[in-house]
């Protein structure tokens, strides 16, 4: 992946407007967070291949870390801490936030076809 | 001497950190070893350092790394096809039956797996529990021994000292090579293993000592029944 280029990502987000798309949304601090540091909490969540349609999308950030909000008819999809992006297999927009050791902390992915199970 | 050893862990790299030295030792003695690897570690957060994988490319990359690691150890590989982080939500008996199918075919004398409840990651605990269930469901005369690996904080207070302390100093290079096969995962503190030669002798010694004794508990069905 490469550092987020905001105009290009905005353009990709707009490409999916009003279409049925599949979402992968995830955040994690690792299965070993509490094992490695008793004061830390092991926290994570993901949802994969959820079919949604959004009618408005924005990416906003300060040049290093970004937020994305997707407005749906009945609610929102939100991710914070995104740093990198790529287009994977031509039609999948992958956005992720990595820590300084390259570990994934958050991911938001959008595709017109289901992600591999 | 063992007849055949089956290693049952959920993630590509569990075999490297947990048992690569023991596997190398068994192979050097001519004992066949088969790895039943539960998942492809699809949800791992390490993407290489610097990153070269992403969430979608990670499974294929880890599959290649796993094959490389097994080739390094000259260990047969069977991939079980579960999804990372989800094993505890599968039907335990179904997973146990799946594993028992392999065990009845391979007829190992020893199974190495994680100690349920004391192996930190939910996949470790649940696949370990299913593996033990699989052995328990076998005909008692055909049951292999089980070595269960525990490493949660405080496990020795709860379980006592491990029964088996395998000194694998002689196979450390092989173990290191196996660990480094998992290039996408060797980050954080394990990243130091990539540059052992450049490290201070003391640090290097400590890193080696951390990995040079592999510890296991011998599972006893009567004693462990309620766990």
Image (tube, rainbow, N blue to C red):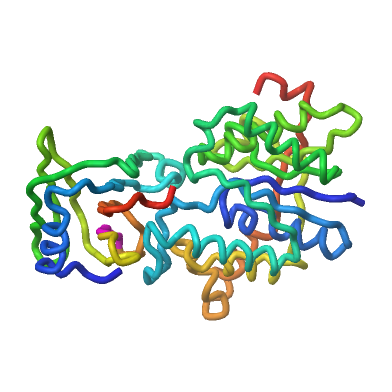
Residue A68 position (above or below residue B73): above
Image-based side of B28 in relation to A53, left or right: right
The secondary structure making up most of the magenta span is strand
Residue drawn where x is 60% and y is 28% of the image:
B92
Could you say where residue A111 lies in the image, as x and y percent from the top left? 27, 54
Could you say where residue A19 lies in the image, as x and y percent from the top left? 17, 49
Residue drawn where x is 50% and y is 31% of the image:
B89
Quarter residue B171 falls in: bottom right
Residue drawn where x is 55% and y is 48% of the image:
B39
Image-based side of B46 in relation to A73, left or right: right
Q: Nearer the viewer, residue A72 or A86?
A: A72
**Residue at the far top in the pictured view:** B226
Could you say where residue B51 lies in the image, as x and y percent from the top left? 37, 68
Residue A18 position (above or below residue B118): below
What's drawn in magenta, residue-wise?
A: A94-99
Q: Nearer the viewer, residue A109 or B114?
A: A109
Residue A95 position (above or below residue B119): below
Quarter the N terminus of chain A occupies: bottom left
Count the labels in the image.
0
Q: Does residue B180 belong to the magenta stretch?
A: no
Image-based side of B56 in relation to A87, left or right: right
Could you say where residue A55 lies in the image, as x and y percent from the top left? 9, 46
**Residue at the far bottom in the pictured view:** B198
Residue drawn where x is 72% and y is 24% of the image:
B224
């Amino acid at each position: 992946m490469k550092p987020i280029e905001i105009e290009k990502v905005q353009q990709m987000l707009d490409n999916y407007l009003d279409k049925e798309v599949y979402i992968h949304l995830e955040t994690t601090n690792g299965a070993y967070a509490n094992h490695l540091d008793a004061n830390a909490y092991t926290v994570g969540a993901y949802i994969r291949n959820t079919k949604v349609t959004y009618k408005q999308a924005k990416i906003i950030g300060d040049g290093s870390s970004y937020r994305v909000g997707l407005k749906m008819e009945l609610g929102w999809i939100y991710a914070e801490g995104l740093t990198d992006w790529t287009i994977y297999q031509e039609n999948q927009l992958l956005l992720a936030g990595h820590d300084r050791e390259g570990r994934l902390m958050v991911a938001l992915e959008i595709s017109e076809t289901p992600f591999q199970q | 001497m063992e007849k055949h050893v089956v290693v049952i862990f959920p993630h590509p790299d569990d075999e490297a950190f947990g048992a690569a030295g023991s596997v190398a030792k068994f192979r050097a003695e001519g004992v066949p070893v088969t790895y039943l690897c539960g998942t492809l570690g699809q949800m791992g957060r390490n993407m290489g350092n610097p990153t070269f994988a992403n969430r979608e490319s990670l499974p294929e990359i880890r599959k290649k790394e796993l094959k490389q690691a097994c080739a390094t150890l000259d260990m047969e590989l069977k991939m079980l096809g579960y999804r990372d982080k989800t094993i505890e939500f599968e039907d335990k008996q179904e997973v146990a039956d799946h594993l028992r199918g392999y065990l009845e075919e391979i007829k190992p004398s020893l199974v190495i797996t994680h100690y349920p409840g004391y192996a930190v990651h939910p996949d470790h605990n649940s696949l370990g529990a299913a593996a033990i269930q699989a052995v328990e469901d076998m005909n008692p005369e055909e049951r292999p021994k089980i070595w269960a690996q525990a490493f949660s904080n405080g496990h020795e207070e709860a379980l006592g000292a491990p029964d088996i302390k395998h000194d694998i100093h002689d196979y450390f290079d092989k173990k290191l090579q196996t660990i480094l096969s998992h290039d996408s995962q060797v980050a954080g503190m394990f990243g130091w293993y990539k540059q052992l030669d450049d490290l201070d002798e003391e640090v290097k010694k400590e890193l080696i000592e951390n990995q040079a004794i592999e510890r296991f508990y011998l599972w006893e069905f009567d004693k462990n029944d309620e766990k």
